[in-house]
Amino acid sequence: MIDHGPIDVIIPAFNEEGSIGKVLGDLPRPMLRRVVVVDNASTDHTAEAARAAGATVVAETRRGYGSACMTGIRTLERLDEAPSIVVFLDADYSDHPDELPRLVEPLRSATAELVIGSRSLGRREPGALLPQARFGNWLATRLIRVLYGVRMTDLGPFRAILWDRLVALEMCDTDFGWTVEMQIKAARDGLRYTEVPVSYRKRIGTSKITGTVSGSVRAGWKILYTIWRLRR
């Protein structure tokens, strides 16, 4: 096992006061240096709950998953020592934070540079991954295989990446295209990629994306557009 140095976590959060404490409580904190929760213009007490659970909380008033992730990255850039590994996961408690060591192991052993937690390969609670999300993943990953020659099974938000590789990707999507942008750019740049099975459960509360028809349509369109825009 190679010691890659500090591991930091970025958690985008919008109105997740009921779940963020559970997420933070299940993280394997001894192996982490810092956990950054990006409060994405929440109208509830997400920020207060995150601080009470020991997270560093920063604000991003511009709504959008990608906007929140990039604010988290900028926060880590300002530290005296950059992290070696960055982990992203959602704030809704659908991911299993205690499975984080499974994601970072391929990075620490130098067998991968980007690791995606695949819900398709792991155990899913019935009803956790809605039909529109399953179809969207199926379509997007097959298009990526055709256009970029990389086999993927999921665009899951629970992921880990080496810090220097993340910075080099120059991420820019501000909303639904964030996850697929990272995977496409990684494939295009030849990063060593792997997936590990992760567990997935029903989220706390209603999804802001797949929980509504309009959110599902907007997310699906943006993902497909991003795949086409970044094609070789």
Image: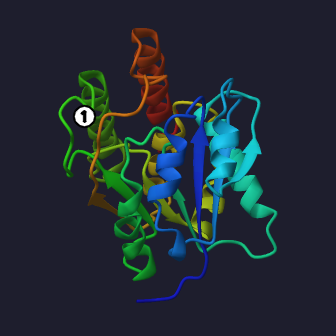
Residue 65 visible in the current orientation: yes
Q: Nearer the viewer, residue 112 or 10?
A: 10
Q: Considering the numbered disc 1 on the image, is that residue within a helix, a strand or a loop? A: helix
Pinpoint residue 161: horizontal percent, then vertical percent: 50, 63
Residue 200: image quadrant is top left
Which residue appears at 45% of the width and 32% of the height?
A: 228
Q: Residues within 10 Å of mark 1 (few under 14, many from 20)?
A: some
**Count of numbered marks:** 1
Q: Going 81% across and 74% down the picture, which residue do you hit?
A: 80
Residue 89 appears in the rendering: no
Q: Outermost residue, front direction?
A: 52
Q: Quadrant of the N terminus?
A: bottom left
Q: Residue at x 50, y 32 (%)?
A: 226
For badge 1, the amino acid type reads Trp
Residue labelled with disc 1 = 138
Pinpoint residue 176: horizontal percent, then vertical percent: 52, 30
Quarter of the rendering containing residue 167: bottom right
Residue 17: percent from left, percent from top: 57, 34
- Residue 164's spot in the image, x, y percent? 63, 69
Considering depth in this image, is 52 or 103 the residue closer to the camera?
A: 52
Nearest to the observer: residue 148 or residue 126? 126
